[in-house]
Image (tube, coloured by chain):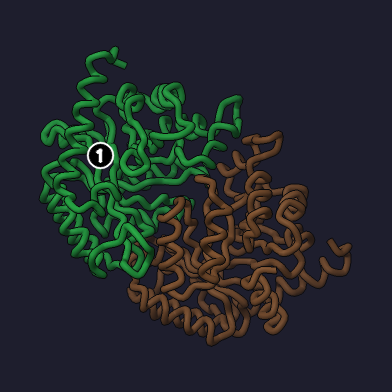
Chain colours: A green, B brown
Amino acid sequence: MSQFVQKYLEIVEKKDSVLCVGLDPALPSQREKNVMPTDNRIEFMKSIIHDVAPYASAIKMNRQYLIGLSVDELKQLNVLIHQNNMLSIIDHKLGDIGSSNASAIFWFKEEGFDAFTFNPFAGNISEATKLAHNKGLGIIVLTLMSNPEAVFQKQAIINNEPLYLYVAKKSGEAKADGVVIGATGHVTSDDIKDIRIAVGSDCLALVPGVGVQGGNADAILHYFGSRIMINVGRAIIYSDDPIKMARMYKNKFNEQRIRINQRRIRF
Amino acid sequence: MSQFVQKYLEIVEKKDSVLCVGLDPALPSQREKNVMPTDNRIEFMKSIIHDVAPYASAIKMNRQYLIGLSVDELKQLNVLIHQNNMLSIIDHKLGDIGSSNASAIFWFKEEGFDAFTFNPFAGNISEATKLAHNKGLGIIVLTLMSNPEAVFQKQAIINNEPLYLYVAKKSGEAKADGVVIGATGHVTSDDIKDIRIAVGSDCLALVPGVGVQGGNADAILHYFGSRIMINVGRAIIYSDDPIKMARMYKNKFNEQRIRINQRRIRF
């Protein structure tokens, strides 16, 4: 099993949580709702990290909200995350090839992250996984997303299979650490089962779309067991009470896990 | 025609060049070859911008090499680029959806870029194009890449067509400003023709792979005419004489344009 997945499973057991908190810090000037009460992204993220630390096993930061922050600023955050016994994922959706991917991975390491998300449109999943593992980082590959237009990932056929299964197989062969699977919309229980078979038993699932978007992680919990990171962003970080909301989601996912484990044939 | 394409064509005419210089500033500690002679990415990029300004119509910066730089630092660079009558593209390969894309686009604007590259794996090309145009930015969509593994963009079939044509049609419908087309390997003249028909006559082609990688832009020049940005990175910025190399590529592409225009039936 990969170093990253092993570390994650130890934290899940210790903290009894599969909650990953997504940090999307938006400036008040940036949009109308879901914005920080301050202009200071680092202070806001620090405060959320403190709030959710007892309830979360991982933090995911979306790069599209971190542009302009220094390596040292992010490193500080990642030290804090590690002190609080969580893993830190940069949701970068890296999708270059060769030396450009190597450059990004160099910087992720400098910033102190444990893993990153990868976009497979350019291919080179195996190359990127090697680059990641050489730096001691985990890689989590976008595989089947749940926004309506991503349904083309099911409709496009290659080698007699849908594109998302092609990506899942490549990810499994490369020994990538995880796959991103959406939890709403067109993603069915059978899709998730097929992905789980394709990636093998060591790979984890990162699951967005459960908080505000209203998705349900039941099927992913069924097929991936504890090897799941359920991400909740806005519903926690922009709520009036992030502590309460983080605790609520942690408990909710644990009740789901217990319910599903009871009827689950070990997969 | 889009504001971005119109501006670009004016510069191409004025400067008599379709050269775009790619900035991939790597620290000496980052890898073995193709590194800067300094640790200061901003100073290095400034010096290259000065060197290539007489010969280039655009600068493309790859985000994977810019991580950790501040908004103000990049803004300074972009002011310099504009003072030298070039356009500036952030090669970000943005591939999120909804508010995350909006956040990235907010920051691209703050940084002073004119356009960005977009990765269509999550779909939402039309949504992203609207967000870009609302901010006065151009969007250039990855469509058919030339690295060997990207051949799946031709092999995956959707609506009885290869995936890259599906992307090209969506980009054309969305009125995206440009498409990225690789110039080597499996990309054929017929592929380029099909993309050109799908995206329409206002869309430009951004073409990587021509310098060190040894690709040939003949077919893209044939079908896209002056609506082409031919990117050269390493072969200029890490050469002993960036001025000489930029001039050489400018002239080389112009000779190609003249040769191809002579035998070209207006498309």
Does residue B91 sit above or below B18 in this rendering? Answer: above
Residue B135 visible within the image: yes
- Rendered location of residue A158, percent (x, y): 60, 31
Residue with the most extreme bottom position:
B83
Where, by quadrant of the figure, is residue A249 drawn?
top left
Out of A29 and A89, give the one closest to the viewer: A29
Does residue B256 sit above or below A46 in this rendering? Answer: below
The residue indicated by pointer 1 is A4
Where, by quadrant of the figure, is residue B35 drawn?
bottom left
Out of B100 and B42, give the one closest to the viewer: B100
Does residue B164 sit above or below B75 in this rendering? Answer: above
Q: Name the residue rendered at 35%, 65% in the picture.
A: A67
Does residue A245 sit above or below B75 in this rendering? Answer: above
- Rendered location of residue B255, percent (x, y): 77, 73
Q: Is residue A244 left or right of residue A25?
A: left
- Rendered location of residue A218, percent (x, y): 32, 26
Q: Which chain's residue wears label 1?
A: A
Q: Is residue B113 left or right of residue B195?
A: left
Give SS at disc 1: helix
Out of B265 and A38, give the one closest to the viewer: A38
Q: Name the residue rendered at 29%, 59% in the picture.
A: A25
- Rendered location of residue B34, percent (x, y): 45, 65
- Name the residue type under label 1: Phe
Out of A37 and B191, give the one closest to the viewer: A37
